[in-house]
Image (cartoon, grey):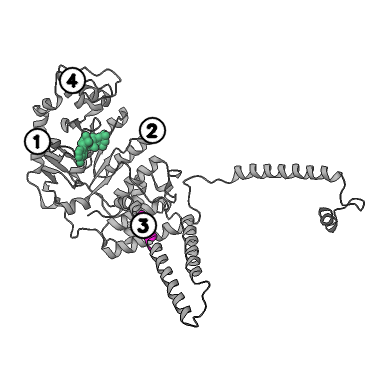
Amino acid sequence: MGEDVLTAFGFTIKGEAFDYVWVWYTVLFAIGCCLLSILGSVWCLNHIRFATGGSLGGIEDTAKDSDEKEESTLEMKGATITFKNINYLVQASTTKEKLHLLKDISGYFPAGKMTALMGSSGAGKTTLMDVLSLRKASGEVTGDVRINGHPQESNSFRRMTGYVEQFDVQSPQLTVRETVEFSAKMRLDESIPIEEKIKFVDHVLAMLELDNIGGFIVGSDTGGLSFEQKKRLSIAVELASNPQAIFLDEPTSGLDARAASIVMRSLRRIADSGIAVVATIHQPSVAIFNSFDSLLLLKRGGETVFFGDLGKESFNLIEYLECYSSTTPIKGGENPATWMLTTIGAGSAGSGSDDLDYAKAYANSALSKDCLEKIDSMNEGVTEEGRITFPTKYATSSRYQIREVYKRQSKVYWRSPGYNRVRLLVSGIVALLFGSVFASQRVPENESDMVSRSRKNDEAKFLRFLLLTTVCLACFAELSSYVNLYHCALPRC
Ligand SMILES: Nc1ncnc2c1ncn2[C@@H]1O[C@H](COP(=O)(O)OP(=O)(O)OP(=O)(O)O)[C@@H](O)[C@H]1O
Ligand SMILES: [Mg+2]
């Protein structure tokens, strides 16, 4: 047959379809193909790039060139938060006693300043931030929290602050710009025109150095933005609500020195715009530690060891701790953050000065008294101007939110071809399954046909029930995966 085909196409030598020389022709042909493929691959590798996390084909990055950009007229301003004698108790899960997680913590987070929350693991840093930002649903909180001297009011406080969780989740199918825009649309007041919101998003992206990757898709762990870019995106999502204070839980953990310095640069820019920045921080480098303006140092058990301005190159902190005779003086070139944790017994070495309780020493110190006096003076003679109130609980109406979520979800589905293919396949299989129930059925002609059809109907009902249950279970699974996702983007109740 092969010879017939060769003859039909005229591949004959001296009238014979097969000749031994064909073997060498085919070897030469294979070598030629190989060479062509290699050269083609080399050219493609040199000229075509598929960078992970790269711009999504067909999706325009609406970012304008910097010279075309118009300044946002939305003003960024900050608020000063003071807190006095904060105590937090929770019921222990195994015993009946109550756990005293935060003990008489006082301090203030001034507008336009960066405050670091530090302490050993389990000292209560996240708990303190959660308590102050009203995120604790259980337990007993006592103490006085004031914003610009006015008592903390839950609805307005939630609208005026941002909280960047340690592991925030963003939608992998959306671009950086779309993610921040969604947050701005949902969390900036509905009365603000959309053009203004977009201009504000431009401003936020520029502040966080995300403007050049605005058109990049967020992607998942296997491809997409780097961990550090995702961290900055989470900060941008919170900043898009134009908060007056922003809380960040370990913004630099898991980042290398270069990535951490980019995040810190962005935080400094946010603080310089007037917003109060509060961040818990773990094992910072000297440069990162020195970039904070003040420090709240906690000890295991939720007690304050130090609160105050760090001073130039942590001078105030070093001076304060070294005034105790039991403190080993800091060595030249030593990281003050590591030294301070070792001194109070919270460092990796675990050994501190055994004969001095630094928490008790702080409670009796002049520094603690100064702090309380400063809080009182900040809260004296407050003006109505500083009161932050919002007319509604949420920035946007439910109708607006549903419309935006629907638009966003449509985009997510559109960009998930794999998921859509499976859905189409499942729909086809289900349709065939239902159809097969009636495959042998004709138009009923007699009573027995009618009985058989009603039996088939019962079978179809059973199939429908099975299908509905499966769909419901799938929906719940899908819903639970979105709870985290929307938690960071939707206004919180
Ligand atoms: N709801 C709760 N019930 C019981 N214990 C709790 C509760 N919330 C926090 N804790 C405990 O309070 C302590 C402080 O926790 P927290 O998460 O605030 O520490 P952290 O300083 O943020 O630590 P890390 O540096 O590891 O993040 C921990 O010992 C934790 O187990
Ligand atoms: Mg924590």
Element on which disc 4 rests? helix
Q: CA distance from mark 1 to mark 2?
A: 37 Å
> Nearer the N terminus, badge 1 or badge 4?
4
Residue behind mark 1: 372
Q: Which residues are magenta?
A: 468-478
Q: Quadrant of the C terminus?
A: bottom left
- Please say whether residue 475 is one of the residues in the magenta stretch: yes
Q: Residues within 10 Å of mark 2 (few under 14, many from 20)?
A: few
Q: Amino acid at mark 2?
A: Asp
Residue 114 visible at all: no
> Nearer the N terminus, badge 2 or badge 3?
2
Q: CA distance from mark 1 to mark 4?
A: 22 Å
Q: Amino acid at mark 3?
A: Leu
Whether label 2 touches label 4, CB < 8 Å: no
Q: Residues within 10 Å of mark 4 (few under 14, many from 20)?
A: some
Q: Is mark 2 within 8 Å of ligand 1?
A: no
Q: Amino acid at mark 1?
A: Leu
Whether label 1 touches label 4, CB < 8 Å: no
> Nearer the N terminus, badge 1 or badge 2?
2
Name, please, the residue furthest toward the front.
448
Q: Amino acid at mark 4?
A: Glu
Residue behind mark 2: 256
The residue drawn where x is 41% and y is 61% is 410
Q: CA distance from mark 1 to mark 3?
A: 54 Å
Residue behind mark 3: 473
In-image side of 53 versus 377 (left or right): right
Residue behind mark 4: 322
Whether label 2 touches label 3, CB < 8 Å: no
